Image: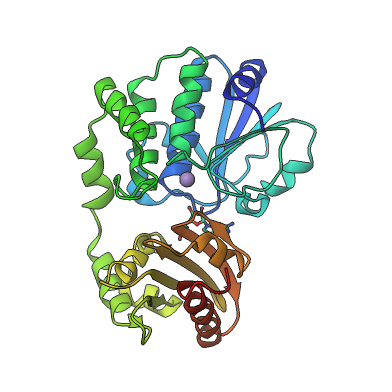
Amino acid sequence: MNSLADIAAALKRAEGALICGHVMPDGDSLGSVLALGLTLESMGKKVTMAGPDPPPEIYDFLPGLDKYRVGLPPDVEFDTLIILDCSVPERLGRGFQELLSGEMEIIILDHHTGSSCFGKYRYIDPAAAAVGEIIYDLIIEMGLEINRDVAVCLYTAIITDTGSFQYDSTTPGTLRRVANLMEIGVPAAQINVRIYEEKPKAFFQLLCMALSTLTTSSCGKISWMTVTRETIKNSGAMDEHTEGLVNYAKSIRGVEVGMLFREIKEGSYKISFRSKDVVDVNKLAALFGGGGHPHASGSTVQGDLNEIIERVVSAALLAVRGIGQ
Ligand code: 5GP
Ligand code: MN
């Protein structure tokens, strides 16, 4: 692992940078990519910000989003590849993962426990609540000012990955950084409204349909919901509106593990895992080829939905009983 000073030096040497986050980008992935991209641009570097999937509509307000390219631009020139918030190469997605065998410098900045070992320069801090915190520190390390646009991107990265400061990943250091971002001029309340209080009506139709599938284990500690392609179609919502639904399963009194089984394409299911306290859902997701954080993780599995639910719920039951992890 490198120090932030090593990373800062490698960035200063870079002439052209390609910055990318993970598939199905979230607020931390997008906010971090844009914050670092805008900063490197202000240093006079040639910057490309890109990812395999389109950004969810709720992030339309992010400064610099107009420069974000979906898919790898064919004409992109870079000597440094910077990968953010991505614990395993597969999370880079098609078209980007293949770049890892290239000749360029590769810099990984991440905050996942057990982030796999790829890239030449690596800075992994599982204590960081969001990669946005690492980018904040990196900009300071480079001796640069955080401008208002960059501050908006960093605030968004931090607020979304901490569940608005609800998760135990939130530290005094998180709040100090956010206080500084607000002093720079981040309109925090306006951003919160954009992210959390501007949902289309179809979202509520989707929520109703998803809640109607809510099931709780007989012990009351595991709860789950399902969203199929048909649910998405009939609700009129988009895939990105499933973000956060899993929290309803988790927030039932007595529930330790909440899960959402979401069909991403026919026969392929994305599982979101959330836990409140003792269960390490990073390990639970790893049993199904995924990963993440101790209280928030995910994986993608193929097969029959009922069989998948049976297997995953059995594993979750073992985990809440303290066996099998
Ligand atoms: P979500 O349920 O919100 O999609 O994902 C929660 C967290 O789990 C993400 O921030 C990410 O760290 C992790 N995660 C989600 N899906 C996958 C996956 O397929 N593989 C791995 N390794 N991690 C995932
Ligand atoms: Mn993150």
Return the residue found at the far top.
143
| Quarter of image, res 233 | bottom left
Location of residue 217 in the rendering, given as x and y in whole percent from the top left corner: 38, 84
Q: Nearer the viewer, residue 244 or 42?
A: 244
Q: Is residue 95 left or right of residue 44?
A: right
Q: Quadrant of the N terminus?
A: top right
Colour scheme shown: rainbow
* Residue 255 in view here: yes
Which picture quadrant has residue 278? bottom left
| Residue sitting at x 57%, y 50% | 52
Determine if residue 263 is in view. no
- Depicted 187 relative to depicted 270: above or below: above
Task: Give x and y (percent) for residue 228.
Answer: 44, 77
Q: Position of residue 306 (x, y in %)?
A: 50, 87
How many numbered marks are there?
0
As drawn, the residue found furthest toward the front would be 322
Nearest the camera: 253 or 244?
Answer: 253
In the figure, residue 211 lies in which quadrant? bottom left
In the displayed structure image, the side of residue 301 where residue 79 appears, left or right: right
Decide which of 249, 145 is in the foreground and name it.
249
Identity of the residue drawn at 37% across and 39% down: 158
Residue found 49% across the figure and 38% down from its top: 68
Vertical placement of 3 versus 266: above or below? above
Where is residue 6? Give x, y as percent: 64, 21
Quadrant placement of the C terminus: bottom right
